[in-house]
Amino acid sequence: MKIATLRFNEIEIAEDEIFYFEEGILGFNNQKRYLIIDTNKESPFKWFQSVDDPSLAFVVTDPLTFKSDYKIEISEEDAKELKIYDSKKTKVYVIVSIPENPLEMTANLVGPLVFNPEAKLAKQIVLLNDSYDTKYKILKSSGNKLTCVY
Amino acid sequence: MLVFTRKIGETVAIGNEIKVKILEIRGNQVRLGIEAPKEITIHREEVFLKIQKENKFAANNAPKSLDQIISFWKKVNLNDEKEK
């Protein structure tokens, strides 16, 4: 099928690339279908693109790239909803926020996106773990070594 | 908004399945015990609001292309390696 996107114009995608978010994601409850677009395989960043709203896309990343001890607990109810029977088969991404100075970019570790690639179901879950931050700075050593040039 | 006055140990029932009990009052803090069916998720509201706000920020500030952030990421990675 063909879908319209702001960043990639019209793209051809397979039906089975689409993930269904029963509840949407927080703040975007009406958008339920998304896909992951990988434009550069060597980079840890991917696009999380809405199928139904061409302009709605997020930058996402594998949290383990930036926080190797990141762990999430999926509640029994969420597992049931996503039809997860084997947690090894899930894929987790976190949404990246990019402020004016991209060196300050952060990842939201409290609301990860959990995907079940087999069932094509996904959900933004809310972690109970108090030790994670919604604004986790991912470029740790960016502090004073690099200056941002536009 | 429905407003109740309750004492410590008393409960408010919402529908047949949800119960909210006042456990303890300490200064300006109230400890609540909530009983609800498993499929009902219960969170502190500010956590929800924070994630909602973060999602909106991320969507509104998503770049046109990943090129710039990839190049920043590469530079930081290289710097890290030089240090080792």
Image (cartoon, coloured by chain):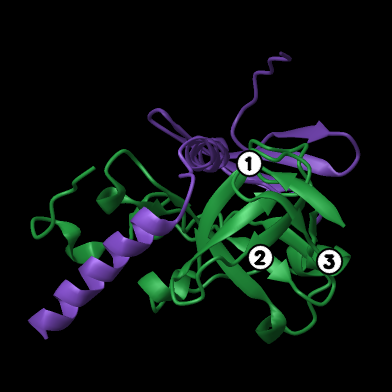
Chain colours: A green, B purple
Question: In the rendered image of this protein, does residue B47 appear above or below residue B3?
Answer: below
Bin the neighbour count of mark 3 within 10 Å (Cα to Cα): few under 14, some 14-19, many 20 and up: few
Write the residue at 11% across / 86% down: B84
Residue A83, image x, y percentages: 84, 72
Residue B23 relative to residue A33: left or right: left
Marks 2 and 1 close (CB-CB < 8 Å): no
Specify which label sits upstream in the sequence, 3 or 2.
3
Residue B5 can be seen, yes or no: yes
Q: Residue at x 65, y 25 (%)?
A: B6
Compute the Cα span from label 2 to label 1: 25 Å
- Mark 2 Cα shell of 10 Å, populated few (<14), some (14-19), many (≥20): many
Give how far apart the Cα atoms at labels 3 and 2 are.
20 Å
Q: Nearer the viewer, residue A61 or A13?
A: A13
Rendered location of residue A59, percent (x, y): 51, 54
The C terminus of chain A - image quarter: top left
Image quarter where the N terminus of chain A lies is bottom right
Disc marking residue A6: 1
**Mark 1, secondary structure of its residue:** loop
